[in-house]
Amino acid sequence: MENIKITAGNKDIYWTGSLISFNEEPIELDLNSFSIRFIFETSKSETNELRYEVENGRVMKFFLNNANNPLGIQLTEPFKMGTISDRELYINFSYRSMGDTKSALVVITLYLGGNV
């Protein structure tokens, strides 16, 4: 298969994919030099919430609270995570519940920006 280059404006697509979660278990992308982890939480509050933290400078954790609804949770714009290979690294994602199941559709795109 030929190598395909995908761009979005002036950003190169580093990786993109969609997947279906398994019983609200965490999802982890291991990209060799770092990892991205999506953790699904439920609270008594009706409010959807998205927060993040960095663990050991190598793992970006996104916590999605009360995301199990038809509207789900998504970023409103790409989020700058840091750098990889001396280029800016951004992420954008969307999480959508799949009805009354404990599964959800997650769409993720990683972008590479300019040199730093």
Image (spheres, rainbow, N blue to C red):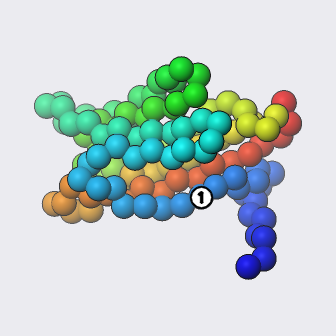
Is residue 9 shown above or below 62?
A: below
The reply to whether residue 70 is visible in this rendering is no
Residue 75 visible within the image:
yes
Above or below — where is 108 with respect to 76? below
Query: Label 1, on which residue?
Result: 16
Q: Is residue 58 left or right of residue 96?
A: right
In the image, is 90 to the left or to the right of 22?
Answer: right
Task: Looking at the picture, tell me which residue is in the foreground, 14 or 71.
Answer: 14
Which quadrant: the N terminus? Answer: bottom right
Farthest residue in the front direction? 32
Assess disc 1: are there few (<14), some (14-19) or many (≥20) residues with their C-alpha within 10 Å of its C-alpha: some
Q: Observer-nearest residue: 95 or 46?
A: 95
**Depth order, front residue of 75/116:** 116
Q: Give coordinates of residue 111: x percent, y percent.
A: 68, 48
Residue 23 at x, y = what percent?
Answer: 23, 53
Rendered location of residue 81, percent (x, y)? 62, 33
Assign the C terminus to one quadrant of the image: top right
Image coords of residue 90 (percent x, y): 65, 41
- Apparent side of residue 50 relative to residue 34 in the rendered image (left or right): left
Seen at 37% across and 33% down, the residue is 63
Looking at the picture, which amino acid does disc 1 mark?
Answer: Thr
Q: Tag 1, which secondary structure?
A: strand
Q: Residue furthest right?
A: 115
Task: Report the number of numbered marks.
Answer: 1
Residue appearing at x 33%, y 50% in the figure: 72
Q: From this view, report whether residue 37 is shown above or below residue 96.
A: above
Query: What residue is at 53 percent from the left and 20 percent from the top?
Result: 56
The residue located at (58%, 22%) in the rendering is 57
Q: Residue furthest top?
A: 56
70 with respect to 8 (left or right): left
Residue 49 occupies quadrant? top left
